[in-house]
Image (tube, rainbow, N blue to C red):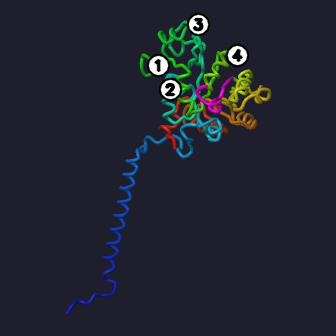
Amino acid sequence: MGTEQTPGSGRPRVWLVAIVIAVGVVLVALVATMLVRSSSGSPQSGDQPTADPSSLTPASYASVADMVSQDPFFVAHRGGSAQWPEMSLLAYRNAAEWGVGALEVSVARSKDGVYFGLHDKTLDRTSQVAGDIDPATLTWDEITTSYRNKLNSTTTQGEPYTRVTEIFEEFASTHVIFVDTKYIGDPGQRAELVELMLAAAPADHWVLKGYYDNISLTSLARDNEIASWGYYYVRDLSELAATVGSWDMLGLEIAASKEQFAAVLKEGKPVIAFFVSDSSSLSEAESKGAQGMMLTDAHAVFGTPRLAQ
């Protein structure tokens, strides 16, 4: 005669089976998630960007209007003045790969009329030489034969100085380019430079950059339907009311107080903070209300490259 089973005596065994199945499902899900992350190439925890990736804008700007529609937007100062040999093709290529949508270049002119990337009046600082070597007294062949851009270079050879036409040809169609005419004060030479710009990309890909009192530059920009950016240091803010109307965008040094930024922001124009060198200064500039960020070191700001969405 079979043993009679009391009601409920089989339930513990059923619950045990259910628990084992549930644990198995969770483990399979965890393994699948790890495999997906691994195959997608997502950075590991130690390589995460210092800024929240969801808050970052696309890696390039189709126009100035596209750029200023982003908050924040990013500009690589001289391609990355604290990171790579400034205004070299290496710097601009790296900045573009790191996901900076706008690039800034200061322009010098050789004796024989070649426009190239250089911030200073002489080659001394970037070539690490002495003697007040003025590129305006040298031909392009003399410059490229005798001097190299060695600042921030990882090699003793440095990088070649770069014609602006090379920079424009490679990046102007996909990025916004800020052009600082710097020591080129001759109106004819400035007009010639603008012709080179517009031959490479339409007017809405360009910003002419100048110190706040460079009003002649704003006239050149307006005549060619190019946007303009005037930058101020704290010492210049007493001149803000008299000069602000000439510029489409404004710049203010990051050392300015929140109240001083507020006075500039009150003008209702995009304000670019300079210089943003790391994630903490990015946070500082954002807290003061800046929309644009003039970067000197994309690596220190982002942590890992930003990819186009």
In the picture of the structure, the residue carrying the numbered disc 3 is 137
Which secondary structure lies at badge 1? loop
* Mark sitting earlier along the chain (1/2): 2
Question: Is residue 129 magenta-colored?
Answer: no
Dot 4: what SS? helix
Q: Kindly report the distance in space between the C-alpha atoms of the residues bearing marks 3 and 2.
A: 26 Å
Residue occupied by mark 4: 187
x then y, percent, for residue 266: 75, 37
Are there few (<14), some (14-19), or many (20+) residues within 10 Å of tag 3? Answer: few
Q: Which residue is found at the position 54% from the left and 15% from the top?
A: 125
Name the residue rendered at 47%, 10% in the picture: 145
Q: Nearer the viewer, mark 3 or mark 2?
A: 3
Q: Is residue 86 visible?
A: no
Q: Amino acid at mark 4?
A: Pro
Q: Quadrant of the N terminus?
A: bottom left
Label located before the other in sequence (1 or 4): 1
Q: Earlier in the sequence, mark 1 or mark 3?
A: 3
Q: In the rendered view, does 115 fall on the left or right side of 89?
A: right
> Which is more N-terminal, label 3 or label 4?
3
Q: Amino acid at mark 2?
A: Ala
Q: Identify the secondary structure beneath mark 2.
A: helix
Residue stretch rendered in magenta on the structure: 199-210
Q: Quadrant of residue 115?
A: top right
Q: Alpha-carbon distance for marks 4 and 3?
A: 19 Å
How busy is the neighbourhood of tag 2: few (under 14 within 10 Å), some, or many (20 plus)?
A: many
Task: Using the image, tell me which numbered label, if any, was put on residue 91.
Answer: 2
Magenta-colored stretch includes residue 203: yes
Measure the alpha-carbon separation of dots 1 and 4.
30 Å
Residue of label 1: 159
